[in-house]
Image (spheres, rainbow, N blue to C red):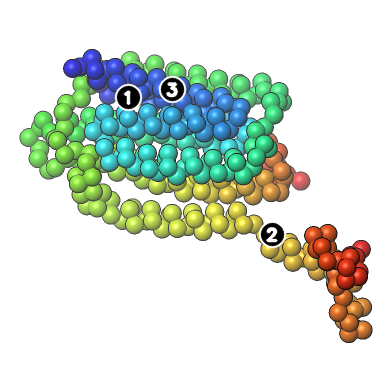
Amino acid sequence: MTVDHYILLSAILFTIGGIGFLSRRNVLVALMSLEVMLNAVNLALVAFNRAQAGALSQSSFSGGTAHTGQVFAFFVIAVEAAEVAVGLAIVLSLFRIKRTVRSDEADLLKN
Amino acid sequence: MSWLGYAYFYICAAVAIGGAITTVAARNPIRGAMGLLTMILSVAGLFLALHAQFLAAIQVIVYAGAIVVLFLFVIMLLGPSATSPRDQRDLVARSIGASLFGLVFALAGVFVGRTLHPVTMLEPSSDFGGIDAFGRSLFADALVPFELSSALLVVAVVGALAVARGRQGENALKEYRNTEAPADAGNRESGTIRLVATESSPLAGEVGGVTRP
């Protein structure tokens, strides 16, 4: 098992999420695509951290194992929870005003 | 034993990609949320294979337990209007944007893949990724960001409350003043109390209330 497998999977997931975010008009689906992208990023972070920890354990450096990537992924999860809470509140607010969840009908600032 | 690891990875990866495609392509958002759940669970499985046991647990609890459920709440709150009808407007522009994104990423993958040489992952120390070692790293190296993230979550919750509640209280008050003020003015002068019948009050007819204009 090499890191490349995980990085390739992460890139595929990120691309799928990005395509969904760009091509879907339903705000809920766009938010879910964003989740897919952030999950892909987390996977890459954890895979790189795993490779680094394996290398560290073999070397003579014995400063303990660094969990930098995992800590980073942990913060990504925390930020994502906040983002979803605010994003869904905005979706509800938009729905109350315009009776729609389509992103191209959210043109309140235009006219 | 090695083929078992490969089989586990490929199964999880296939399920994750299938879930991601379902999330992106499903017309019904409920199905999209189920695809997202599938993807999250299989990524949690991959975290387990990567010696990130604590993150796998967090992934299941926070994503599957909180975020997907929040999505489901909102989808069910919106009801059938959460499903947007199929439309062909801007289809060309959207597909051009999406395919450009995909193309750029494929190119980047090719260029990066040329320079990579497969890095075999060595076995880390046995406590790597457990809650003990992870907690040590978190509180030793990232204590300040950790505390700041709690502030972020508080701000997000307060902001979500403020945005979702909206100005309905203010607007209702304004509407009430607009409709009631002229009618009430006359009554206050004459000093009588008037019953205002609304459609929802069953007593309106019996007590002879005056119907609102």
Query: Where on the picture, by quarter, is residue B52?
Result: top left
Marks counted in the figure total 3
Residue type at mark 2? Gln
Disc sitting over residue A6 in the figure: 1
Q: Residues within 10 Å of mark 3 (few under 14, many from 20)?
A: many
Residue at 46 percent across and 49 percent down: it is: A82
Residue where numbered disc 2 is placed: B168
Is residue A37 among what the camera can see? Answer: no
* Image location of residue B8, percent across then percent down: 29, 21
Q: Are marks 2 and 3 in contact (CB under 8 Å)?
A: no
Crowd around label 1: few <14 · some 14–19 · many ≥20 (10 Å): many
Front residue of B205/B54: it is: B205
Residue at the (27%, 41%) spot, across then down: B54
Vertical arrangement, residue B123 with respect to residue B3, above or below: below
Using the rendered image of the protein, determine whether residue A10 is visible from the camera's viewpoint: yes
Chain of the residue displaying label 3? B
Asked which quadrant contains residue A5, the reply is top left
Chain under label 1?
A
Question: Where in the figure is residue B93, as x and y percent of width and height?
Answer: 65, 24
In the rendered structure, which amino acid carries the disc numbered 3?
Ile
Q: Secondary structure at mark 2?
A: helix
